[in-house]
Image (cartoon, rainbow, N blue to C red):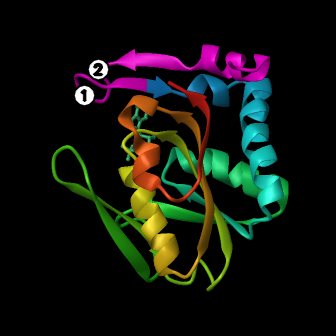
């Protein structure tokens, strides 16, 4: 059962059929971003879940993970680390590839972004198959980071992405 706050967030999400390609029902979160009260409500979900974990840093996934992750980092006074699509980060990077429906994609993190033993919460907007978050998790582990939890605003539960991310705890605030 949704709380009234979560219900408001659910009502604001716009569904766009066949974007970016046929067969995908795209969950558009921009109406949440555009509404101050809803954006605050969304950030507060992440903040209240993250605060007790006593993380050292927030890692956000390109690009919508930055919108939520950076706000959470600011609110909790933590550092923020971007995981970006290949070719966007200017300094030395570690890379992780993951499979797409056709071909593969690569995400990168700066080699000095995390210190050995730093405790991290990974944030993105939406969990689908879990491929992107799994690749970001590998980067965090390669860097010696301790991944406490992965958080999403939305989860497409029928794709079973959380199983792919196991044993890392996964938390999502709106399940479909
Ligand atoms: P995946 O790696 O399959 O878990 O896909 C997750 C990434 O793709 C996230 O960064 C999402 O922003 C994006 N994504 C996947 N499916 C959707 C969808 N139906 N609506 C909006 N974004 C999606």
Residue lying at 55% horizontally and 33% vertically, measured from the top left: 154
**Residue 76, image x and y in percent?**
83, 57
Q: Is residue 13 left or right of residue 27?
A: right
Work out which residue is located at the far left of the displayed protein and give it: 102
Q: Is residue 92 left or right of residue 151?
A: left
Q: From what the image shows, is residue 14 above or below residue 163?
A: above
Is 36 within the magenta? Answer: no
Q: Nearer the viewer, residue 155 or 126?
A: 155
As helix, strand or loop, the secondary structure at mark 1 comes to loop
Q: From what the image shows, is residue 135 above or below residue 112?
A: above
CB atoms at circles 2 and 1 under 8 Å apart?
Answer: yes
**Residue 25, image x and y in percent?**
36, 22
* Quadrant in the picture for residue 159: top left
* Residue indicated by mark 2: 18
Q: Which residues are magenta?
A: 1-26
Is 2 within the magenta? Answer: yes
Q: Nearer the viewer, residue 37 or 88?
A: 37
Residue lying at 45% horizontally and 32% vertically, measured from the top left: 157
**Residue 122, image x and y in percent?**
59, 57
Quarter placement of the N terminus:
top right
* Residue indicated by mark 1: 21
């Amino acid at each position: 059962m949704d709380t009234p706050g979560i219900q408001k967030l659910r009502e604001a999400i716009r569904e766009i059929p066949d974007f970016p390609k046929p067969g995908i029902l795209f969950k558009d979160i921009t109406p949440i971003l555009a509404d101050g009260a809803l954006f605050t409500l969304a950030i507060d979900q992440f903040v209240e879940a993250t605060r007790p974990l006593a993380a050292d840093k927030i890692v956000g996934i390109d690009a919508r993970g930055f919108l939520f992750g950076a706000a959470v980092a600011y609110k909790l006074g933590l550092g923020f680390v971007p995981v970006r699509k290949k070719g966007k980060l200017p300094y030395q990077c570690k890379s992780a590839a993951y499979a797409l429906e056709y071909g593969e994609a690569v995400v990168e993190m700066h080699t000095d972004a995390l210190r050995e033993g730093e405790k991290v919460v990974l944030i993105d907007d939406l969990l689908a198959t879990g491929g992107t978050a799994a690749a970001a998790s590998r980067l965090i582990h390669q860097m010696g980071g301790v991944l406490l939890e992965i958080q999403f605003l939305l989860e497409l539960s029928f794709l079973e992405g959380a199983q792919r991310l196991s044993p890392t705890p996964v938390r999502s605030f709106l399940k479909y």
